[in-house]
């Protein structure tokens, strides 16, 4: 990484390891073996985060590079202003030639329902945020297989072109170290592809793996992009897991959305119910009449005003088309 930093590439490292570092410290210095509850993991993260950064700091200093630290929670990506604040900071750091930002989930304060699936999800958010050229996901297997990677008949898929090949079925098994699995990784790769970003999934145990990827060698699995989206669309697409409120469209509007024959914004006349409270600028979940999630968008006004306008013609649009992301049929 130091080599490519010197070559002019802008690099962000998303790293886990705080809990593992804390567990090692607790075992060696305290003689205590912590369990796996959320509370105990938070203690381990608070013990291990600075140990982890100490390792990175010493490694990069050998190459004249400073390691900066960003600890983030999922909640910070749900507000557009917080999202832009993170973007602004990363842009400033990346302009410095001798600093590499190292990002981790703030495990010591994150509550379970607001945790990232794993750091692959966090890496995807960051890559989307800075409009990266590549997202490299290092894992314990060589890449995406057409079956369980532990079975000898399973074969590595070296390239996935979603336009030509679609998306493969993969094993549901997970590594013992992470919260996610290959399905999670492919889910991130799918969003990256739709954002115009190439994803590489490969083994952390492969020698010089970053060098191989940067030199366009065929290693692991490469997932090609399908299209470009605006920065705002990317934020909406990657922030669709947790919203402040829910709206339910009527059957007529649902059919129009499914047909997707023309560009539309969401108007109150096509909305039949509101659940929860939200303000202007908040993300809201969009559901079918029976409650199936079909998308997410940015509210142009608060929930109480929308309730006044429900089902009425001639009222101001609630979500503009440019602030919508639908996932019907995905």
Image: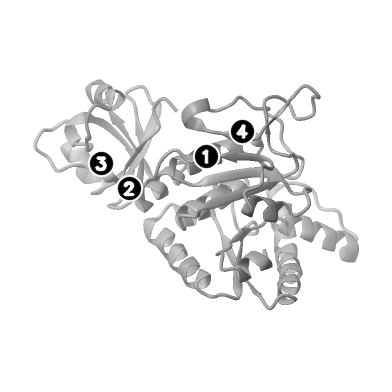
Q: Secondary structure at mark 3?
A: helix
Mark 2: give few (<14), some (14-19) or many (20+) Cα within 10 Å: some
Label whose residue precedes the other's in the sequence (1 or 4): 4
State whether residue 228 appears in this view.
yes
Label whose residue precedes the other's in the sequence (3 or 4): 4
Judge by depth and name the residue closer to the eye, 276 or 108.
108
The Cα–Cα distance between marks 1 and 2, rounded to whole angstroms, is 36 Å
The Cα–Cα distance between marks 3 and 1, rounded to whole angstroms, is 26 Å
Vertical position of residue 179 compared to residue 250: above or below: below
Label whose residue precedes the other's in the sequence (1 or 2): 1
Provide residue 127's location: percent of width, then percent of height.
Answer: 51, 53
Q: Are marks 3 and 1 in contact (CB under 8 Å)?
A: no
Count of numbered badges drawn on the protein: 4
Residue placed at 20% from the left, 45% from the top? 305
Judge by depth and name the residue closer to the eye, 235 or 299.
235
Q: Which residue is mark 2?
A: 278
Specify the label residue 224 is tagged with.
1
Left or right of residue 157: residue 314:
left
Q: Which residue is mark 3?
A: 321
Provide residue 187's location: percent of width, then percent of height.
Answer: 55, 36
Q: Are marks 4 and 2 in contact (CB under 8 Å)?
A: no
Left or right of residue 100: residue 154:
right
């Amino acid at each position: 990484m130091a080599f490519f930093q010197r070559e002019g590439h802008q690099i962000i490292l998303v790293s886990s390891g705080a809990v593992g570092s804390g567990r090692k410290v607790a075992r060696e210095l305290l003689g205590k073996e912590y369990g796996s509850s959320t509370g105990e993991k938070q203690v381990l993260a608070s013990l291990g985060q600075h140990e982890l950064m100490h390792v990175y700091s010493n490694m990069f200093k050998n190459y004249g590079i400073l390691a900066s630290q960003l600890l983030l929670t999922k909640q910070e990506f749900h507000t557009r202003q917080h999202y832009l604040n993170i973007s602004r900071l990363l842009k400033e750091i990346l302009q410095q030639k001798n600093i590499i930002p190292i990002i981790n989930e703030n495990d010591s304060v994150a509550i379970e329902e607001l945790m990232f699936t794993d750091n692959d999800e966090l890496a995807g958010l960051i890559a989307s945020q800075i409009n990266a050229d590549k997202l490299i996901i290092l894992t314990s297997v060589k890449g995406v297989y057409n079956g369980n990677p532990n079975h000898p008949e399973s074969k590595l898929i070296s390239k996935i072109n979603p336009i030509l090949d679609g998306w493969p079925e993969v094993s549901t098994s997970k590594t013992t170290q992470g919260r996610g699995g290959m399905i999670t990784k492919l889910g991130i790769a799918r969003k990256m592809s739709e954002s115009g970003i190439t994803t590489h999934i490969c083994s952390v145990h492969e020698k010089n793996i970053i060098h191989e990827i940067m030199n366009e060698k065929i290693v692991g699995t490469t997932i090609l992009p399908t299209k470009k989206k605006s920065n705002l669309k990317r934020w909406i697409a990657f922030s669709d897991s947790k919203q402040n409120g829910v709206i339910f469209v009527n059957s007529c509007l649902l059919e129009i959305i499914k047909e997707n024959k023309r560009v539309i914004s969401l108007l109150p006349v096509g909305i039949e119910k509101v659940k929860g409270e939200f303000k202007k600028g908040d993300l809201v979940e969009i559901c079918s009449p029976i409650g199936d999630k079909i998308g997410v968008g940015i509210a142009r006004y608060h929930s109480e005003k929308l309730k006044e306008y429900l089902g009425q013609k001639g009222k101001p649009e609630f979500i503009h088309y440019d602030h919508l992301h639908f996932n019907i049929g995905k």
